[in-house]
Structures are given as C-alpha cells and as structure tokens.
Image (cartoon, grey):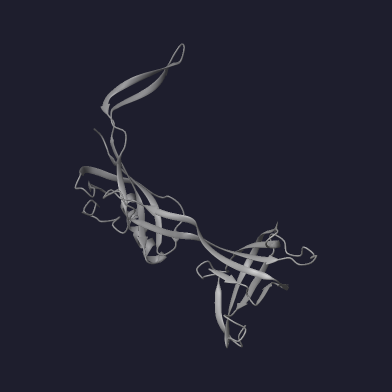
C-alpha cells in the first residue's frame, strides 16, 4: 500500500512536512510450509509471524534537529484524500517503533529523508494498521 | 488414503511424512585392554525397526489443537502398540508409538498449527 503526498503526517508529537509518500509493506517473518508423502507440491502454507513496515519519505528543505531516532515508539498518523475539496478523508494510524532514519541526496529529488518503522500491537492478533473515514476532507 | 496407527487417525488434520530409520546388524563398540582400542562386536541380532513421522497438526483454534496434541500424547504414554499404515498402504505391524515431540511453539496464523515428530519402534528382531 502506498499513500502519495498525504495531507498531514504526525509521528508522535512531531509533525512531518513535505512528505512525498508513505509505503506500508507486509512481509512474512516466518512461513510454515509442509509437504506430504502424496506428491511433490506444497500441502500447507501459513504465515504465523508477520511484519508491517512503514516507510515515510519526505524532502528536507531546511536545517532540522534530529529528534526522531531508532528505538523510539510513536503513533504514526496520516490523513489522505483524493483532493482538498473531498468531503471526507482517510486517516491511517499505527503504533510504530522507529528502526532507521536515513538521508539521500539527488539532483532530481533534493535531500530526502526516509524514516523506517515497524508497526506493533498490544495483542498480536489484531492488525496494527487502523484506517478510518473522517469527515471534513483533506 | 489416510494414514493410521493402531486403527486411529491421530494425524489426519495436517500433512505428514514417514521415514524408516537405520536398518542392519546390531553392533556395539567396546574398549579392550590393555590398549583400550575400540572393537566392534556383532550382537547376533538385527536393529529394531524404527519409523519416524514428521508433520503438522492443524486446527481452527488453539483449544482444538490442544485436543489433537493431547490425543497423540495419550497414545504415546500408554504405550500404544499396533499397526502403522502410511498414505500408500505400506504397513508395519507390531509398532509402538514411543515418542511424540512438538518441533517448536504453536503457530497462530490463518489457522492454529504445530510441527511435530513422532517415533515408532518395533521391539525385538
């Protein structure tokens, strides 16, 4: 899943500006795969350990203090809408732990900061990403 | 066809496989004085037949999975003696389920499951 140019992004108490995209990747930390004596093909697959990784990519336009650091736990919140005139917007929230804050410079994009986080939940059975429709547009 | 042991379908909830253990002569190594070099002695017997089953028990809920686990554990602790039949009707008579071991923690994903190893032995020649 990818959110392009979300309207408002906060990570804990920090409002992140100039966010160009936020990606949500879902991957398997453990895949249970079983064959049987009945043939060559897989008979059982399950993904009992999963990981949701959120990456925030933004453009740095001025000097910034490095307040976001690996190991910090925050609530990530973003609001997105098809257009500013939309009657409603989607708000996506997740409790995340920052695992890296990296920077890359290119002539085309300028100085980009990528904040990589992993979502977590208090109880492992629930999906860590919450998406709600909010009135009032983007 | 489904596999079975002593007429019981204990493992039909998930895929599983059978492998035969070592076959051959029963040979033991002893240390002989005065040099205490190792010498092998043929005990005039064959190795006991050993079948190892690996697979995964699968259930919709943790409680249902524990019911499956407890059923196998009960048979392993009796100990249960009977005929072991694999998916292709290969039959091993007079086998005893001597060991049942979970391969790790219970996996909770789309379903609840756990990998295991079960071991059968035919005592004597």
Q: Position of residue A53 (x, y in %)?
A: 57, 63
Q: Quadrant of residue B125?
A: top left
Residue B48 can be seen, yes or no: yes
Q: How many marks?
A: 0
Identify which residue is drawn at 63% across, 63% down: A117
Quadrant of the drawing holding the C terminus of chain A: bottom right
Q: Residue B97 location, x and y as percent?
A: 30, 46
Q: Which of these two is toward me, B90 or B48?
A: B90
Q: Left of B9 or right of it: where is A6?
A: right
The relative height of residue A105 versus residue B50 in the rendered view (above or below) is: below
Q: Of A101 and B110, which appears nearest the observer?
A: A101
Identity of the residue drawn at 65% across and 65% down: A57
Residue at left 46%, top 60%? A48
Instruction: Between residue B97 and residue A92, name the one nearer to us.
Output: A92
Residue B78 makes an appearance in the image: no
Residue ranking furthest to the front: A108
Residue visible at 40% across and 66% down in the picture: B63
Q: What x and y, as percent, mark residue B8?
A: 24, 55
Q: Quick check: A57 left or right of A133?
A: right
Q: Measured along the vertical axis of the image, is residue B80 above or below residue A49?
A: above
- Give the image quarter of residue B2: bottom left
Position of A21 compared to A125: left or right? right
Measured from the top left, where is residue A4 in percent x and y?
59, 71
């Amino acid at each position: 899943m990818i959110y392009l140019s979300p309207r408002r992004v906060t990570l804990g108490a920090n409002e992140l500006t100039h966010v160009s995209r936020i990606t949500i990747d879902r991957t398997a930390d453990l895949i249970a795969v079983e064959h049987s004596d009945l043939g060559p093909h897989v008979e059982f697959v399950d993904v009992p350990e999963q990981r949701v990784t959120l990456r925030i990519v933004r453009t740095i336009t001025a000097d910034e203090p490095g307040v976001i650091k690996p190991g910090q736990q925050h609530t990530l919140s973003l609001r997105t809408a098809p257009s500013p005139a939309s009657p409603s917007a989607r708000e996506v929230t997740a409790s995340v732990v920052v695992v890296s804050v990296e920077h890359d410079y290119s002539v085309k994009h300028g100085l980009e900061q990528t904040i990589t986080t992993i979502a977590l939940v208090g109880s492992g059975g629930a999906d860590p990403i919450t998406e709600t429709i909010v009135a009032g547009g983007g | 066809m489904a596999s079975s042991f002593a007429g019981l379908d204990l493992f039909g909830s998930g895929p599983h496989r059978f492998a035969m253990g070592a076959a051959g002569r029963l040979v033991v190594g002893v240390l002989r004085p005065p040099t205490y070099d190792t010498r092998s002695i043929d005990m005039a017997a064959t190795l006991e037949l050993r079948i190892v089953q690996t697979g995964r028990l699968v259930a919709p809920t943790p409680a249902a999975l524990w019911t499956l686990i407890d059923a196998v554990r009960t048979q392993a602790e009796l100990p249960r003696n009977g005929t072991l039949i694999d998916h292709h009707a290969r039959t091993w008579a007079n086998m005893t389920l001597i060991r049942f071991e979970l391969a790790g923690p219970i996996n909770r994903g789309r379903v609840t499951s756990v990998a295991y190893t079960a071991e059968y032995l035919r005592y004597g020649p």
